[in-house]
Image (cartoon, grey):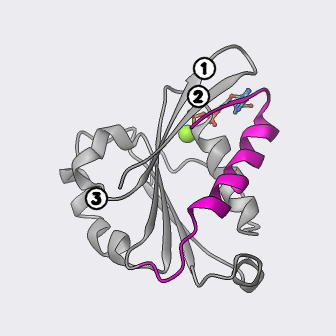
Amino acid sequence: MIKITINPKETEKLAGFLLEKFIEKNRKQALVIALEGELGAGKTVFVKGLAKALRIRSKIKSPTFTLIKSYGLPRTSYELHGTSYKFLYHLDCYRLRDHNDLESLGIKEILNNPDNIVVIEWSDRVKKALPEKYIKIHIDHISDTQRKLNIDITL
Ligand code: ADP
Ligand code: MG
């Protein structure tokens, strides 16, 4: 699926809309959303949209130096979506060499836990750490305010 957005707000809204589509009840593993695209493409903006849709109040900043951040989901988020996700994990792999750098963070347990939604910026750097099934979104810069999002679900 290809979507064009014409400002950051639209990218945020699209993230919320897509989240509704991705949510799956009785999931056995984490819901994984892999974000690709150059610096400034809008990956973090997309994560902000996810966080808003999940009613997370904390400010979202890309964990470029910390690599990983987790946010507890408020109860309103479960009621809203009728699911039992409990955490959003936000990873930024910009500074990583490859998937080996992720293993020490306990990524396996995070990905195996169906309570988690895991969104990964620069996921193309850690392809080998990704589960079999995940949602890949590649964001391309078209102009100052236009972005093209290529959304791909691997089965
Ligand atoms: P990344 O995380 O991919 O490096 P960011 O999300 O941090 O990128 O930054 C994207 C930048 O592009 C922000 O400054 C944002 O305001 C701007 N922008 C302009 N148009 C859009 C759009 N349509 N969607 C997302 N971001 C946009
Ligand atoms: Mg970012």
Q: Is residue 94 left or right of residue 146?
A: left
The mark that comes first in sequence, 2 or 1, is 2
**Which residue in the structure is indicated by mark 3?**
132
Circles 2 and 1: CB atoms closer than 8 Å? yes
Looking at the rendered structure, the kind of residue marked 3 is Glu
Q: Quadrant of ligand 1?
A: top right
Location of the N terminus (image quadrant):
top right
Give the residue drawn at x 56%, y 24%. Answer: 140
Give the residue drawn at x 73%, y 86%. Answer: 75
**Which residue in the structure is indicated by mark 2?**
41
The mark that comes first in sequence, 1 or 3, is 3
Magenta-drawn segment: 1-27
**Which residue in the structure is indicated by mark 1?**
141
Looking at the rendered structure, the kind of residue marked 1 is His
Whether residue 60 can be seen here: no
Give the residue drawn at x 72%, y 57%. Answer: 59
Q: Secondary structure at mark 3?
A: loop
Q: Nearer the viewer, residue 65 or 3?
A: 3
Q: Does label 2 point to a residue whose CB lies under 8 Å from ligand 1?
A: yes
